[in-house]
Image (tube, rainbow, N blue to C red):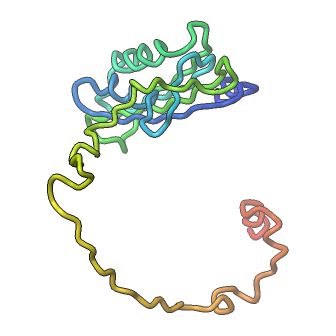
Amino acid sequence: DVKAIMANSGSALMGIGRASGEDRAIEAAKMAINSPLLEVSIDGAKGVLFNVSGGPDMAMAEINEAARIITEHIDPDAKVIFGAVLDDKIKKGELKITVVATGFANGGVSPRPASSFNSGPNLFDNISKNGGMSHGHVQQVAQPQQQVQPSQTIKEIVDPTVNEEEFDIPAFIRRKMNK
C-alpha cells in the first residue's frame, strides 16, 4: 500500500492527529492534514494513504467522516488507500489518524495560505510605545555552575574482546548465526 502511493511520486507529507470528544474524527482529520508545525498542506495530492485508529468505541461513521474531511482537500482523481485499526492501547474516547500524501502537481507540497495559521495571541501586545514592557519587569537570575565529571573512560566502556568486524554483519543475521 505504501509503495503504491509513494512510488515515483516526488515529495511526501505526513501528518498525525489525535482527538477525543464529540467530533473527534473531524478534529483528528483536520489535525493530521493541517500540522501547525508545517507551512504546507495536502491540497492537490494525487496519492493519499491514511489510517484511522481507535478503541472498541470507534464507529464506521467516524471513519467515513475522517475520509470525507481528507478527500475534500486532495485531487478529485487521487488514489486513496485507507485502513482502520481497533487498538486497545488507545484511550477510550480517543481517535488517532495518520495521513501520508504524495504526488503534488508542482513537484512539491503546496504552501499553506498565511490566513490558515492560528498564531494565538500576539506576543507583542504588551510592549508600550516607548519600547518598554507595559506590565511586569525582567530580572537577571544567576545560574549556578555545575562541574560534570565523566563516570567512565572510553577504555572502560569498550569491551576489548569484541571483534569489530562482526559489526559489518547486521545484528539480526549475527543473532541467527549464534543460535
User: On the image, which quarter does residue 115 sit in?
Assistant: top left
- Residue at point 34% right, 36% down? 119
Residue at x-position 51% and y-position 29%: 99
> Residue 150, located in which quarter of the rendered image?
bottom right
Instruction: Name above or below for residue 115 compared with residue 146.
Output: above
Image position, residue 178 (x, y; %): 76, 70
* Residue 129 horizontal side relative to residue 119, left or right: left
Residue 147 drawn at (x, y percent)? 44, 91
- 146 displayed left or right of 130: right
The residue depicted at 38 percent of the width and 87 percent of the height is 145
What is the x, y in percent for residue 53? Answer: 41, 32
The single residue placed furthest to the top in the displayed view is 76
Quadrant where the N terminus is found in the figure: top right
On-image quarter of the C terminus: bottom right
Residue sitting nearer the eye, 99 or 137? 137
Q: How many marks?
A: 0
Above or below, 179 relative to 135: below
Furthest toward the front, the residue is 130
Residue nearest the observer in this picture, 83 or 138? 138
Q: Quadrant of residue 111?
A: top right
Image check: 123 left or right of 99?
left
Q: Position of residue 45 (x, y in %)?
A: 59, 19
